Image (cartoon, rainbow, N blue to C red):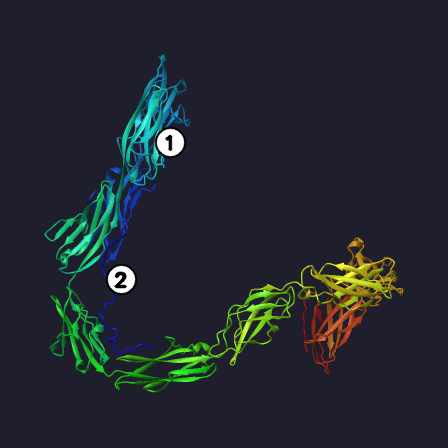
Amino acid sequence: MIPDNSNESMSLEGFESMPFSVSIESVDYGPVFVQEPDDIIFPTDSDEKKVALNCEARGNPVPNYRWLRNGTELDLESDYRYSLIEGNLIINNPSEAKDAGHYQCLTANSLGSILSREAILQFAYLGNFSGRTRSAVSVREGQGVVLMCSPPPHSPEIIYSWVFNEFPSFVAEDSRRFISQETGNLYISKVQTSDVGSYICLVKNTVTNARVLSPPTPLTLRNDGVMGEYEPKIEVHFPFMVTAAKGMTVKMECFALGNPVPTISWMKVNGYIPSKARLRKSQGVLEIPNVQLDDAGIYECRAENSRGRNSFRGQLQVYNYPHWVEKLNDTHLDSGSPLRWECKATGKPRPTYRWLKNGVPLLAQSRVEMVNGVLMIHNVNQSDAGMYQCLAENKYGSIYASAELKVLASAPVFALNQLKKTIIITKGQEVLIECKPQGSPKPTISWKKGDKAVRESKRIAILPDGSLRILNASKPDEGKYICRGENVFGSAEILASVFVKEPTRIELTPKKIELTVGESIVLNCKAIHDASLDVSFYWTLKGQPIDFEKERGHFESIRAQASSADLMIRNILLMHAGRYGCRVQTTADSVSDEADLLVRGPPGPPGIVIVEEITDSTATLSWSPAADNHSPISSYNLQARSPFSLGWQTVKTVPEIITGDMESAMAVDLNPWVEYEFRVVATNPIGTGDPSTPSRMIRTNEAVPKTAPANVSGRSGRRHELVIAWEPVSEEFQNGEGFGYIVAFRPNGTRGWKEKMVTSSDASKFIYRDESVPPLTPFEVKVGVYNNKGDGPFSNIVVICSAEGEPSAAPTDVKATSLSVSEILVAWKHIKESLGRPQGFEVGYWKDMEQEEAAETVKTGGNESSIILTGLEGNTLYHLTVRAYNGAGYGPPSSEVRAATKKSPPSQAPSNIMWEQQGSQVSLGWEPVRPLANESEVVGYKVFYRQEGHSNSQVIETEKTQAVVLLPDVGVYIIEVRAFSEGGDGTASSQIRVPSYSGKHCYGQFKYANSQNSIYYSSF
């Protein structure tokens, strides 16, 4: 049953307190950065000649922008080089002296200001080396030496390399030679004679890629002997304290002078060198990529040779820029409330915190406390509103987090839809009247009924959110209730009228129904309710609302009376069975009732069909029962489908009748070696249901074939051949693999059979050839079948004759006559033969310049003795032969004859046509047509005329260049002239249109027409 909702609490829809609806665009908020300035390195030799520091913020009202350099606000008006485009600062013609430094963007609107992170503007340049000549360095062979680079002024970093003697011969670094990227000096641990020469220091700016060369430093050898061996002396080493940011690549240098050349090795004190570390420059550089906090520690480099060793230790410290763990959120507080904001950041060293308000440092006061990233303001007021920033910083960097504080102060106010409410309930229900005024500070709530304050009791309570709740309402609870919200800034009230009605009751009939598919029923729902209330009816099926539009053919809701409704269900289907609900809704309550509808119908589909056992002609099947749909199943029907059947067919079964309580049966009389699918259909007294899902496809077992070939007969063949033909046995009846045919034959009147095996299952013919067999010898013939399981039956015996053979005589008296430019008539005679009788003749023809193998052919049927060849080329000589043919093949060809097609008809059309009309008689004249050399001579002319709108023309032939045409009927005639020759009709002249006035005399002038156009002049 649908639950009775008579005791549900009722409140007027939309009574709940809701904030005022405003669009985002109308809400004021302080600035929020969209883009903050980034560090910039500006090349002094750049063609751009200007620097852009970007800053963008959103806010309402739209923010404005100011800029600070090294903490001091820039006066953008006093320096023409500055310009502000939206929030972006543009510096034209920047210089290091005036413009290098730390920049911050300050953006503000009426709600407050925020300060961006610092962006450093640097200038990239590379000065020149001093032009002063460098003194030569003279050492003994075997001694170590350091050549000083003394780089010029530069910014930022530079890369060092050394040139030996002349550019571009660079000094190659190895275990003996080392270039420090910290000092730029060249270190040679043991000088050799090959080192003597001139050395030049080359430096390259990493930003501008500019390069400059130092003056050469000559290196010479002293002649006072060779330096003896000595222990290593470390000349290059990393600092005692190396600092690096997490994630950077650290490079530590170590190189020693010595004789012999020292080897360099590295270790980490109290630990292991990270596996990701790499040794560069013959182990002179230890490189640690993506350095992490646990890579920090004391590192040692050692220099060793046979004379001793030396070492250096330094500490690697890895720091981490500050990173936010907890940021600030915009906060709205009532006036007088406390504020507590906390920002948290990680970093190494641990960050310290500072607070800004509207871009300037916030100072501690009596109400303001700042401790370790926590900001507390007691008893906030309007002066505390604004934009706040938490600044977390350590020695390596700083980060900013921003938030807005809004302090609310307003008198209580109610939403418009809460100002006046009407609440209608029934006896015993709960009344809930919400009272949620908007105001700051939060308003205090009081309730009155009429002029008296509401007194709380076990049944009546004012809830913590200000709402009034009345339990188990009755008639005395009716009346007008007033809620008042009040704070220091004012007060506001709302009015709610409460009415208590008698509860609604419902009757749904009938309660339980049984129907058959296709029948109809009416459910009646009656409501007993308070006369002052309107009622609405709602129908459900299986807990879901009925869609009357979608189900228009089956469901109809009928409202004949104000307090009752009917549900008409027509032509019921199985899917319409279930629990129907009627819900009655009034403005005070909602009640419902249910009825059960059972629908009987044809059975559902049986469950999956399983093939339990298979033989060559039977299949034992089982299935799970079908749903009887409330009417017992009387029988099952078993159906099968194979590649050879027309869809699903009912099969014979054992037992012959499958009753409704059975779940298995045997299909019989199946064909061996055929793939079958099976399905089952259930029937009950109401009808037959849908079939089951088909079983898996399964093949019956093999068996000896039982079907003999049909229509055994003879066919035409060559002389001495016996051609036996039959209709192949369908794959459906071959009963197994290895299917073939046994062809048995014997001359008529003899006893023994001669048998031949034909192994192809698709074969339909067998040819037996024996030179001793005369033509038309009668044979008894039968054809049998077999497969891997054995031999099957033979067909009935038929008598057929051996072949009479192909024609043996060639056609005689062959003649070829040219008819036109594209036609040749070929005629012949043929001697009648007792054997090899022809079924027709084949004419072969080819051009004079072609080989006979390229001949085209055309065939005749029966006893025809001539044919007209068409589609030939004009003025061409053809060779022709004729031969007879029948089913056994072709006879010998005739003697070759030749014939040439006629020349083409004249291509020139008759021209200068003149005509004169008198009544229905038209006199025509034209200039003669003169053929070209490759065209046939003109024999005469044809005048074609037809009535306009008709397709059939009449023709007058004449050998002259004039003719008289009689136009028999009234109307307009179309006339044209063609020359004709033995090659056919030539090109037509231009058409002329002539009106006919039968029975009248009309006089006219001569008219003129040529082949290009027709001109008609008339005067009557």
N-term mark: 2 or 1: 2
Q: Is residue 478 above or below residue 868?
A: below
Name the residue beneath numbered marker 2. 25
- Distance, label 2 to label 1, CA atoms, is 60 Å
Q: Is residue 454 above or below residue 524?
A: above
Give how far across and how far down residue 375 sits, in percent.
17, 51
- The residue sitting at the top extreme is 224
Tell whether 18 sits left or right of 792: left
Q: Residues within 10 Å of mark 1 (few under 14, many from 20)?
A: few
Q: Is residue 862 above or below residue 108?
A: below
In this rendering, the label closer to the viewer, 2 or 1: 1
Question: Residues at badges 2 and 1 in contact (C-beta under 8 Å)?
Answer: no
Name the foreground residue: 991 vs 860: 860
Number of marks? 2
Question: Residue 109: in sight, yes or no?
Answer: no
Question: Residue 411: in sight, yes or no?
Answer: yes
Name the residue beneath numbered marker 1. 280
